[in-house]
Amino acid sequence: MCSISFVFLISFSINFFMMSMYFIMNELTYFLEWELVSLNSMSIIMTFLFDWMSLLFMSFVLMIASLVIYYSKEYMSNDENINRFIMLVLMFVLSMMLLIISPNLISILLGWDGLGLVSYCLVIYFQNIKSYNAGMLTALSNRIGDVALLLAIAWMLNYGSWNYIFYLEIMQSNFEMKIIGILVVLAAMTKSAQIPFSSWLPAAMAAPTPVSALVHSSTLVTAGVYLLVRFNLLLENSMLGQILLLLSGLTMFMAGLGANFEFDLKKIIALSTLSQLGLMMSILSMGFYKLGFFHLLTHALFKALLFMCAGAIIHNMNNSQDIRLMGGLSIHMPLTSACFNVSNLALCGMPFLAGFYSKDMILEIVMISNINLFSFFLYFFSTGLTVCYSFRLVYYSMTGDLNNVSLNMLNDEGWVMLRGMLGLLLMSIIGGSMLNWLMFSSPYMICLPFYMKMLTLFVCIFGGLSGYLISVVNLYFMNKSLKNYFISMFMGSMWFMPYIVTYGIIYWPLNYGQFIIKSFDQGWSEYFGSQNLSQKLEKYSQLIFIMQNNNLKIYLLLFVFWIMILFNLMLFL
């Protein structure tokens, strides 16, 4: 099953990539309409949009999915239900495909809800209480966005069709139609886990690691970003774009801070995804949708590799995810460590790796854009934090001695997993430059003063040094925050967002809903409504039943009895 899926997906991926290059060079866009039902004057038509963007994204999704499935062949080899797992992953990928090629809000909702449902099934794949809680948090947080998308579909009835691609310019100019923009942004924020919906993303780490590699690189969390890439006109020069810029900047900052306080390997990488999603959303909100899409693709490559390396390390560490128990992995697992370090450096924006081309261009565009000082600070400080937690992670896992039990056998013998990782290693090195030449036909020439041009590099070097020094040297002023329990708790728990969301969005509303059901639906309305009526009718029917079942003599006696009573009353009166 794994091998068939791998060959099938990788072949489709290559075909889509070739087609995307052809579409870019010839500037083509194809609309494919498929009539499902035709009845008198009514017809239900399924529309697909094929342009360079959808084809390129599909090729990347299929390539990463194929390598993840190949990797799962060994990673999930002890699982009795591996075929069920592969089927779920394929359903996940197909839902994403539907979402990518849909120019229609109805078919987008099908893919959107497909992603939500299958992600719930995958998060609770390991059946324990932690996975169930994480799955419920993921599903209920995403339902908010699903409802927003349903409302947007309802509001689109103001036009003649749900094919939003034709109405974007009208939506931008018409004040009433900006409601659709607000609802779409809300849906995208829940799916891409922006503040205040960020808490579900680290919780979703309860899923198997191959799923995390797929979810965090090119499917679930990128669906919101991709939707906003398609609706990019609604964010240009609008109040909505400014609000999104603030929230995504804060998400980037919050995730970067949280990752520096985290000790769970998968959660650190999950928070780094959250940080990069904030970066994509913020550059989208400034109107540079091509740059956001470029970073989306490059990030998918090295993030999938990072999760796959983390999975190999966890496998070898007796399923331990604590980075404090790691150490010296570069000696025991050299090939996995090499892949891990390359993907980490690509995440940091190391020159000429995949992440450098998109991150450097984004930060230089920010420098020449008309934004305020606070947003500027969030961009650059968050970039420094990214490098900081990446170097901290490398220090804890790669250097020193192993802190786990002595009887651990660490090795690079899993060749199936390694082949899957090496496929992405190549793309993490050359993917950025390849996409840069492909997507931008004429190179950007961004002319800046020397110090501003070097600012990105200075921030990265300073962030890396800070991460290394905080980990190595136990300096009082650097570890001062750890002395204060409240500050470290606040930073390390994503600004108390999991507690706020769990109580504010899930616990209290559900509790209040239960109270209303008990009081009204199952209380007063039952007592004065249907239940009371049914009880009365039951009593009357019992009386009639007794009367029907008795002998006629009894009725005659009763009749005579009542006549005598009435006669006596009349005499008395």
Image (tube, rainbow, N blue to C red):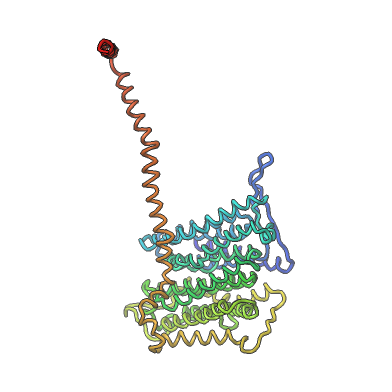
From what the image shows, is residue 66 above or below residue 306? above
Q: Is residue 310 left or right of residue 184?
A: left
Along the line of sight, which residue is nearer the eye, 449 or 296? 449
The number of callouts visible is: 0
Say if residue 391 shows up in the picture: yes
From what the image shows, is residue 271 above or below residue 36? below
Along the line of sight, which residue is nearer the eye, 460 or 372? 372
Residue closest to the far front: 573
Residue closest to the far right: 26
Residue 530: where, in percent of width, then height? 39, 36
From what the image shows, is residue 392 above or below residue 118? below
Residue 86: where, in percent of width, then height? 48, 60
Please give the name of the residue rendered at 37% of the width and 46% of the height, measured from the top-left corner. 519
Q: Quadrant of the C terminus?
A: top left
Please give the name of the residue rendered at 31% of the width and 19% of the height, measured from the top-left corner. 547
Residue 395: where, in percent of width, then height? 43, 84
From what the image shows, is residue 494 above or below residue 163? below
Say if residue 423 shows up in the picture: no
Along the line of sight, which residue is nearer the eye, 111 or 465? 465
Residue 182: where, in percent of width, then height? 58, 61
Please give the name of the residue rendered at 38% of the width and 40% of the height, measured from the top-left corner. 526
**Residue 101 occupies which quadrant of the picture?**
bottom right
